[in-house]
Image (spheres, grey):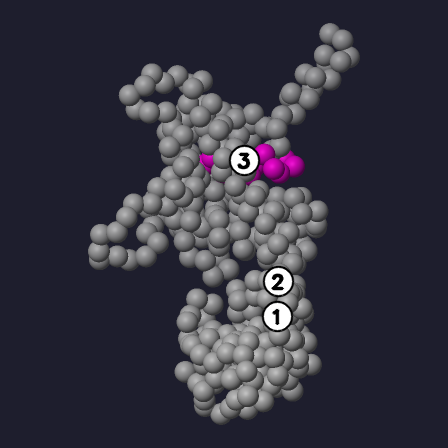
Amino acid sequence: MSQAQSTVKRQRLDVKTIGTHDGTFHCDEALALFLLDLTKTYHGADVKRSRDTLVLDTCDIVVDVGAVYDESKQLFDHHQRGFQEIFGHGFTTKLSSAGLIYKHFGKEIIASQVGAETDHPKVHVLWLKLYKEFIEAIDAIDNGISQYSSQEQPRYSNRTDLSSRVNWLNPPWNEPISLQVIDSCFAKASRLAGEEFLGRLRYYADAWLPARDIVLSALSARYNEDPNGRILLFQRVVPWKEHLFQLEAEHGITGDGLPLYVIYPDEAGANWRVQAIPVTPDSFESRKALPEEWRGLRDDKLSKLTGIDDCIFVHASGFIGGNKTREGAVNLAKLALKCNNCGDE
């Protein structure tokens, strides 16, 4: 045997093996195997799809089969009686194999993808965000947990979620099926789930997280615009609602310390907006809407009433208004703060 052949053989002996069940596949193990390929330990691992315990016992890690969850033995199934593992950190949905692998390997994967250490704060933030927005639904669907209680029939059918799209990749029941065909379909499903995971991670790391930093900076500087910290100023358009509510909770900002208005340029950058902060991120009710007497007015009529030049409008509901200048928008917010009760809902 040549030295090159010996090296190749030695490298193959070092290759790990991942075991999972054969037959019909689901989104949770399809994603779990893709995630494992992103880890240092299991990158490039061979995959054995079987329910035979003799086969599974030869694997370095077993996922979604075997009726055992034991991280120390690298066994990650969730089908066994008594299994109640959850992600924690406020999440209570029972984990599937996707959630189990993500819980144990997620930070390593995120850190390697964003070029940071596993203990970096942004890795932890992204780890929680991706579980909330991507992994948890896969866990719930695989475990048969409804999104909400319902006493009524749904008005329409939704089969476009990731779990459904993975299920559609299983071979049709009435066509001849070989192990090679179904393994090929499984590989395609794993790529589908994994590429969506990576796409979501890239968005959260490159767009969502920078927005959080901007909102945190504005929140920290809020006393520059108002002595009571009730006005936030953004120098550019940024998705702020979700981050603001999360950061307020993290920093213990409550009651009279809550900001009431945000100021930001419009998307064209030509004019400025003053927006009342809602009671919750999805609420139409504001913490303090703009004054009733301003609502529905525009241009000169609004400027005359407020005594502030360059006014553009105030929405009929009082949740937002506009001015041609940043100074004018800030002054609208400051004047609204002085209007006792007139904007409260």
As rendered, which of 6 and 192 lies closer to the eye?
Answer: 192
Question: Is residue 343 visible to the viewer in this orientation of the structure?
Answer: no
Res. 298 mark: none
Quote the CA–CA distance across marks 1 and 3: 46 Å
Dots 2 and 3: beta carbons under 8 Å? no
Residue at 28% over, 21% down: 174
Question: Which numbered disc flags the more N-terminal residue, 2 or 3?
Answer: 3
Q: Is residue 176 left or right of residue 4?
A: left
SS class, disc 1: loop
Give the residues in magenta.
29-41
The three-letter amino acid code for the residue at tag 1 is Asn
The extreme left residue here reads 152
The three-letter amino acid code for the residue at tag 3 is Phe
Chief secondary structure of the magenta span?
Answer: helix
Residue at 41% over, 71% down: 284
Can you say whether 88 is above or below 37 in the image?
Answer: below
SS class, disc 3: helix
Res. 271 mark: 1
Res. 34 mark: 3
Dots 1 and 2: beta carbons under 8 Å? yes
As rendered, which of 256 and 68 lies closer to the eye?
Answer: 256
